[in-house]
Amino acid sequence: MPGIDECLLQAMVVPGARGAAIVDWTSGLALGAIGETPGGDVEATAAETAELARMAAEYPSFAPDDAAPAERGVKGLPVEDLIVTTRNGYHVIRFVETTFDSSVFLHLWLDRETGNLALARLRMADIAERLVLG
């Protein structure tokens, strides 16, 4: 079972990957990062993506009305992942289930011209499932 560094290296194998990070969305701190970051500041990017992840995770609007909490995804969250499309790239945010009381996600930044969004989403799900924290 891979840890943070190995998972980040696996994320960078995705075609078009420009950068990846594992972020605690409660604090907004990057637990690890590799490659480039938008704007060049790892901590600013982590804080900004954490804000987006918090909004999506905490609002019940994203959960089906009839879904039981256990059916809502990671730790009862209404979303599994987020995809943000920009003019030159894609940002894939995948929530990670942990054994301790923490809220962690993987953030992958893809180049829009060379990235494969479908493959990235599948790969991030696999990495998130196998990630070992703690």
Image (tube, helix red, strand yellow):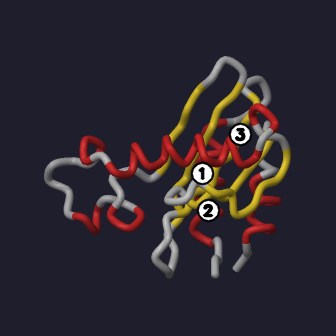
Looking at the image, which residue sits at the far left?
A: 66
The image quadrant that residue 15 belongs to is top right
Type of residue at label 2? Asp
Q: Can residue 21 be seen in this view?
A: yes
How far apart are the alpha carbons under marks 2 and 3? 17 Å
How far apart are the alpha carbons under marks 1 and 3? 14 Å
Type of residue at label 3? Trp
The image quadrant that residue 49 belongs to is top right
Mark earlier in primary sequence (1, 3): 3
| Residue drawn at the location 79% of the way across and 29% of the way down | 114
- List the residue tagged with mark 1: 122
Type of residue at label 1? Leu
- List the residue tagged with mark 3: 109
Secondary structure state at the residue bearing disc 2? helix
| Residue drawn at the location 55% of the way across and 53% of the way down | 94
Crowdedness near tag 3: few (<14), some (14–19) or many (≥20) residues, C-alpha within 10 Å: many
| Residue drawn at the location 58% of the way across and 54% of the way down | 28
Secondary structure state at the residue bearing disc 1? helix
Mark earlier in primary sequence (2, 3): 3
Which of the two residues, 112 or 40, is positioned nearer the viewer here?
40
- List the residue tagged with mark 2: 126
Q: Is residue 108 left or right of residue 129?
A: right
